[in-house]
């Protein structure tokens, strides 16, 4: 413990030199002064700025021992200095001379001489000190403080104080101060500050001088290190006196620096092997009780006495050096650093002791390590509960981490003693070297940090002295740690101590969040429970340990150990294999795949794999269905990106590489892979039971669904009993290109070749068998767009209605090899863009099993042409003009256009073109016109529906049909290469359309490109195209209604002028004849129909007179009107046009019911201008012409006429 700093005082005049009358007075004055000084102790807030240090040190508090100078002897101080003791603070740093003198004459004759003698006495002691002369002014009896001095006009002290300063001040150093004592029993705050401040200054000055002097001595001693006779211990004590001095003045940081420098010097001396100043045993550690002494207690051994006598061993010296550092760190509140340094110190010294283990007591290293760690933890726990000077507790969180590691080191020592004594089994995890998973828990590599003392562990070990002789077993010391001795003797004590310390360490690790370390210790607890056959506890501990390992996704070897223990405990408890057991078995399989476990071929014993075999067998026999995602036991991948076909089989196969990561063979029940294309359609490849050997296996998987396209692997699964191991392969992006068997089943979705617009729309599914007979065929058609719905229940097959199976597929029976079937399926709805996408599904049976055929196809549901009709009415016939045009994209061939009346309808149709010898090509810019004359042989009041039939063919469809027919005549070997080239050629219409339309054959158009490629079978292919005469014509049948409710008026204008010359501007009389025909009026009556005629003005004619009028329609009597028209220009002018409209009755105009009836059966007026093609030649006018037009006078009307 640090000693207080000594300050001496000397009294003058002394009681022995004064008369008896003044003794009581002087004693009272001295007592007041000394007691007043003691009340201001200890000194606080001293500021030390040394010339050898850069920063200012603040000394918060210094303990002071105030005593008379006569009580301090110089002999002990001199002895202390000679021995290398504290030295710096052994002698007083400040000496006070308390002087009572009020008379200047007395000062000259007596006081001055006494002070000089006092200073001479202090100088003879040869120690750094600071004299301070205190002039005491006693209080007056009147209560006023006496003062023996004052200030002169120049500001200098006068009186006795002035004389003292003049006589004893050295340079600018003021060694004199006065104290004006207050009255006894009173408190004057202004009386003491000057004295106390002078005392602080003197103390800091003397301390600085002493430190500088001692540092110089240390430097001189260190410089003689290489001289003969130099003693490290003596120099150590000399330098340690600086550390003790800093500690005495509450500067622990500076003291700690000194000890760190001493430690570095020790290792340097150790490296230089300058060890002749150490004891005979050199390394040490063989004294009784060395293994149980607390290492942070410097009083447990006389360490300083051993150092002073140069008899200390390296073992004791290092313990003392660490203890002093730990005490200073504890005083500074750096608890974490104490623990971390202690961790390194224990590890470092343990390595040194290991080299001399034979000379130590059995298990001495374990015992000392245990004691040291527990002592560090105990002391640090005590320091952590002490209030910090600055209130900073932040370091305690980090301390928990270092504390837990120290407890773990102590626990490992108990574990080693237990294994050595036979109380713990010599297996993993109690003996890390026996681990089958490699070196997992080398304690020193996990718990001990590397040293930072300037010398490596190997170098320190190399230069550490070792005892020259090894004592026999009878001479070896024995342990002194009673706790460990009891653990050696008794199994229960050992396990109890081990369990208690392990649980305490787990709690410490959990407090600082070191989960990995907690798992390691829990593995020890589980292993101990398994070893002691406490199966319930072993199962719970192993299961919890496995759960912790799974949560942090690490420590797979420990997880394997825990799961193996849990399964063993489960079996020993005799429990049924339920879902919990399955989860344990699956987790055990996972870690067995992750941990590198040797196989039997690599020397692994059969019994070591029994647990894994039992787990696999139990899972295979389990009845609880469970999906396990991403299990590590198996790895699946596609071998190739191309599916394969077997000749004569509709099945598709792929090669699958399966890696069995487990060290044992596994018999799986099935293997399946699911793939999906860009449209979301999926297919599956499957393989029946396989035995997967450890390592890589290649399995062939089959798919009974015939499809084509690029598929992406989505999931893969292996079935083991009721356990389904599934693997998500979407992220891998593995693709598989699937092609159909060219000799297999084919299906095509198209529109019917004959379409009737007045019937329900249908599509046709063509099914063609391959080389294999199809049995029990079911066909389905599913729309891929929401606008179209296929009505499968109304489908037709062979002109007969069909039935649906339970899944809604159409049953069509059997199809022989190379046979085909067509199914007509109605649909509802209109697709946007006229294209509809649908999925064709065909399910059938073969001799090899069930098969499925799936394809997505697009069908054009629109028409490639448009038809417009224009009717021209005549009294005896109807002329219908049909315009047939392309839809703007297709080039069409029209074979014929027919308009036929129904039988017995009374209509006769005469076509403008009677016979069609050759087809007519229509283009997007060149339509086809057809004219038909319709005559009514008998009166038909209800009307009739004629049938317009158009036989056509698309040029592109024609070309593709010829290509397919040519392919069907070629052998399969030469089809594939030609199919790619012809497909590209057919898709590019610019290469063949124009030559083909101009009459060039398709073979001639295609020959140049194919022959240049030199592909086998080109000649046969081109010849097959030339010889192909097969054509498929489509038929479009449109119902055409014969127009009804038409009232036809025949108009004829006849000029009545006799002159052949007609001039511009001259009026012309014209007869207007209006004849009515009810041929196309249907069932309308001929009476009561009033018509209105209206002559239209135009730029050529001006109508004068009755421009508009009405009349009663009479088919037997034409209406005659006379009108006047005036030509407005010269030239050949056509006559003005006349419009005829029906004049409705008043009743029909006023009632809604009548209007509704009129809307349904109202007559429509048609006008036939009989001489509309005639014209009149008008000559230019020779002069102006004035004409008078009669206009009715207001009030007068012309009967039956309107103007």
Image (cartoon, helix red, strand yellow):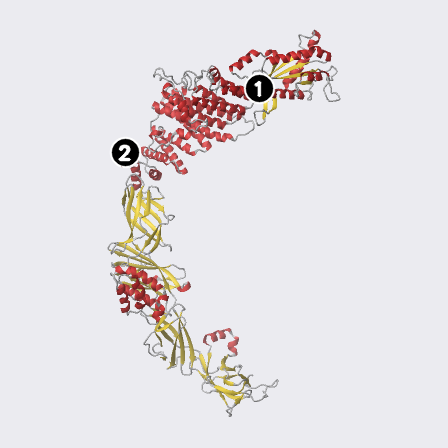
Q: Quadrant of the C terminus?
A: bottom right
User: Does residue 601 appear in the picture of this structure?
Assistant: yes
- Label 2 – label 1 distance at C-alpha: 77 Å
SS label for mark 1: helix
SS label for mark 2: loop
**Marks 2 & 1, CB-CB < 8 Å contact:** no
| Left or right for 663, reference 862 | left
The single residue placed furthest to the bottom in the displayed view is 1058
Mark 1 closeness class: few <14, some 14–19, many ≥20 residues within 10 Å: many
Between marks 2 and 1 in the image, the one whose residue lies nearer the viewer: 1
Mark 2 closeness class: few <14, some 14–19, many ≥20 residues within 10 Å: few
Closest to the observer: 516 or 47?
47
Instruction: Tell me residue 860's x, y (percent).
Output: 37, 64
User: Does residue 1035 appear in the picture of this structure?
Assistant: no
Return the residue at label 2.
605
Vertical side of 900 occupied by 422: above or below = above
Residue drawn at (52%, 31%), measured in percent from left and top?
A: 394
Vertical side of 1107 occupied by 32: above or below = above
Vertical side of 946 occupied by 311: above or below = above
Residue drawn at (32%, 76%), measured in percent from left and top?
A: 917
Closest to the observer: 410 or 1200?
410
Closest to the observer: 162 or 316?
162
Picture quadrant of residue 147: top right
Picture quadrant of residue 443: top left
Instruction: Tell me residue 87's x, y (percent).
Output: 54, 16
Q: Earlier in the sequence, mark 2 or mark 1?
A: 1
Return the residue at label 1.
210
Instruction: Tell me residue 951's x, y (percent).
Output: 34, 72
């Amino acid at each position: 413990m640090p000693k207080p700093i000594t300050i001496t005082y000397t009294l003058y005049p002394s009681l022995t030199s004064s008369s008896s009358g003044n003794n009581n007075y002087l004693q009272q004055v001295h007592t007041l002064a000394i007691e007043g000084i003691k009340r201001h102790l200890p000194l606080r807030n001293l500021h030390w700025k040394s010339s050898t240090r850069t920063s200012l040190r603040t000394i918060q508090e210094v303990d002071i021992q105030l005593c008379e100078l006569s009580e301090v002897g110089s002999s002990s101080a001199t002895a202390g200095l000679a021995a290398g003791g504290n030295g710096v603070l052994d002698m007083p740093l400040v000496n006070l001379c308390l002087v009572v003198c009020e008379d200047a004459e007395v000062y000259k004759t007596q006081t001055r001489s006494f002070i000089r003698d006092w200073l001479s006495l202090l100088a003879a002691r040869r120690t750094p000190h600071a004299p301070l002369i205190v002039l005491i002014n006693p209080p007056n009896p009147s209560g006023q403080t006496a003062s023996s001095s004052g200030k002169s006009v120049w500001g200098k002290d006068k009186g006795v104080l002035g004389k003292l300063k003049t006589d004893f001040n050295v340079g600018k150093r003021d060694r004199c101060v006065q104290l004006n004592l207050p009255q006894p029993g009173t408190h004057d705050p202004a009386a003491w500050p000057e004295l106390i401040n002078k005392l602080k200054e003197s103390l800091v000055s003397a301390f600085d001088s002493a430190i500088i002097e001692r540092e110089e001595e240390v430097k001189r001693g260190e410089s003689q290190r290489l001289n003969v006779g130099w003693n490290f211990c003596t120099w150590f004590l000399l330098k340690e006196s600086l550390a003790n001095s800093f500690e005495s003045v509450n500067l622990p940081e500076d003291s700690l620096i000194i000890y760190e420098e001493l430690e570095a010097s020790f290792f340097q001396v150790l490296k230089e092997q300058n060890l002749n100043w150490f004891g005979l045993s050199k390394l040490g550690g063989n004294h009784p009780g060395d293994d149980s002494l607390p290492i942070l207690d410097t009083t447990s051994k006389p360490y300083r006495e051993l150092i002073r006598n140069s008899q200390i061993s390296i073992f004791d010296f290092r313990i003392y050096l660490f203890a002093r550092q730990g005490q200073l760190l504890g005083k500074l509140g750096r608890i974490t650093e104490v623990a971390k340094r202690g961790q390194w110190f224990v590890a470092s010294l343990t390595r040194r002791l290991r080299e001399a283990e034979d000379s130590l007591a059995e298990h001495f290293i374990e015992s000392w390590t245990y004691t040291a760690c527990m002592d560090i933890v105990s002391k640090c726990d005590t320091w952590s509960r002490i209030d910090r000077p600055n209130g900073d507790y932040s370091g305690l969180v980090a301390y928990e981490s270092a504390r837990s590691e120290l407890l773990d080191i102590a626990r490992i020592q108990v574990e080693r003693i237990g294994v050595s004594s036979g109380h713990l089994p010599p297996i993993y995890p109690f003996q890390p070297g026996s681990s089958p998973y490699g070196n997992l828990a080398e304690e020193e590599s996990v718990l001990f940090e590397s040293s930072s003392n300037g010398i490596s562990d190997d170098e320190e070990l190399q230069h550490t002295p070792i005892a020259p002789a090894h004592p026999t077993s009878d001479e070896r010391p024995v342990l002194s740690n009673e706790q460990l001795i009891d653990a050696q003797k008794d199994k229960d004590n050992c396990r109890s101590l081990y369990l208690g310390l392990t649980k305490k360490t787990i709690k410490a690790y959990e407090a600082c969040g070191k989960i990995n370390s907690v798992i390691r210790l829990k593995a020890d607890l589980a292993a101990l429970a398994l070893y002691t056959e406490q199966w319930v506890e072993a199962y719970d501990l192993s299961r919890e340990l496995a759960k912790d390992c799974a949560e942090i996704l690490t420590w797979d070897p420990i997880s394997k150990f825990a799961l193996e223990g849990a399964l063993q405990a489960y079996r020993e408890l005799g429990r049924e294999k339920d879902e919990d057991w399955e989860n344990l078995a699956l987790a055990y399989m996972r870690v067995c795949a992750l941990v590198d476990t040797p196989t039997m071929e690599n020397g692994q014993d059969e019994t070591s794999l029994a647990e894994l075999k039992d787990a696999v067998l139990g899972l295979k026999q389990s009845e609880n269905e469970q999906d396990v995602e991403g299990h590590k036991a198996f790895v699946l991948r596609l071998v190739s990106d191309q599916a394969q076909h077997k000749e004569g089989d509709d099945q598709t196969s792929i090669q699958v590489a399966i890696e069995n990561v487990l060290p044992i063979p596994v018999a799986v029940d099935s293997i399946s892979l699911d793939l999906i294309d860009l449209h979301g359609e999926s297919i599956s490849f499957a393989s029946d039971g396989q035995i997967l050997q450890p390592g890589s296996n290649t399995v062939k998987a089959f798919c009974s669904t015939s499809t084509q396209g690029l598929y992406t692997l989505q999931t893969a699964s292996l079935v083991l009993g009721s356990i389904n191991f599934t693997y998500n392969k979407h992220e891998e992006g593995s693709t598989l290109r699937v092609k159909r068997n060219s000799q297999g089943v084919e299906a095509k979705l198209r529109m019917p070749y004959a379409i009737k617009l007045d019937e329900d729309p249908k599509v046709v599914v063509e099914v063609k068998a391959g080389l294999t007979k199809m049995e029990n065929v079911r066909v389905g058609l599913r729309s891929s767009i929401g606008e179209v719905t296929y009505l499968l229940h109304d489908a037709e097959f062979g002109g007969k209605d069909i039935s649906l199976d339970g899944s809604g597929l159409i049953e069509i029976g059997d199809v022989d090899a190379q046979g085909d079937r067509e199914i007509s399926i109605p649909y509802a709805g209109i697709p946007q863009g006229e294209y509809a996408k649908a999925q064709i599904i065909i399910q059938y049976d073969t001799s090899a099993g069930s098969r499925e055929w799936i394809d997505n196809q697009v069908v054009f549901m629109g028409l490639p042409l448009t038809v417009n009709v224009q009717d021209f009415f005549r009294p005896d016939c109807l002329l219908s003009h049909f315009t047939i045009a392309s839809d703007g994209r297709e080039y069409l061939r029209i074979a014929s256009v027919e308009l036929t009346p129904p039988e017995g309808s009374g209509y006769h149709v005469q076509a403008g073109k009677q016979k069609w010898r050759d087809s007519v090509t229509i283009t997007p810019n060149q339509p086809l016109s057809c004219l038909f004359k319709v005559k009514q042989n008998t009166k038909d009041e209800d009307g009739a529906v004629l049938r317009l039939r158009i036989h056509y063919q698309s040029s592109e469809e024609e070309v593709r049909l010829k290509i397919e027919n040519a392919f069907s005549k070629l052998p399969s070997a030469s089809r594939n290469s030609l199919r790619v080239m012809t497909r590209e050629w057919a898709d590019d219409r610019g290469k063949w359309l124009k030559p083909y339309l101009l009459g060039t054959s398709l073979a001639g158009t295609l020959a140049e490109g194919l022959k240049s490629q030199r592909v086998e079978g080109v000649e046969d292919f081109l010849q097959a195209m030339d010889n192909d005469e097969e054509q498929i014509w489509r038929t479009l049948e449109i119902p055409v209604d014969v127009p009804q409710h038409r009232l036809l008026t025949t108009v004829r204008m006849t000029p009545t002028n006799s002159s052949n010359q007609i001039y511009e501007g001259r009026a012309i009389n014209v007869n207007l004849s209006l004849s009515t025909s009810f041929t196309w009026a249907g069932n309308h009556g001929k009476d009561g129909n009033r018509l209105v005629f209206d002559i239209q003005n135009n730029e050529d004619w001006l109508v004068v007179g009755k421009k508009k009028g009405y009349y009663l329609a009479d088919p037997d009597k034409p209406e005659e009107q006379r009108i006047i028209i005036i030509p407005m220009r010269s030239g050949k002018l056509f006559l003005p046009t006349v419009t005829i409209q029906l004049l409705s009755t008043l009743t029909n105009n006023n009632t809604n019911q009548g209007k509704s009836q009129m809307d349904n059966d109202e007559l429509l007026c048609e006008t036939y201008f009989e001489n509309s093609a005639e014209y009149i030649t008008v000559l230019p006018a020779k002069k102006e012409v004035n004409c008078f037009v009669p206009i009715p006078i207001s009030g007068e009307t012309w009967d039956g006429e309107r103007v």
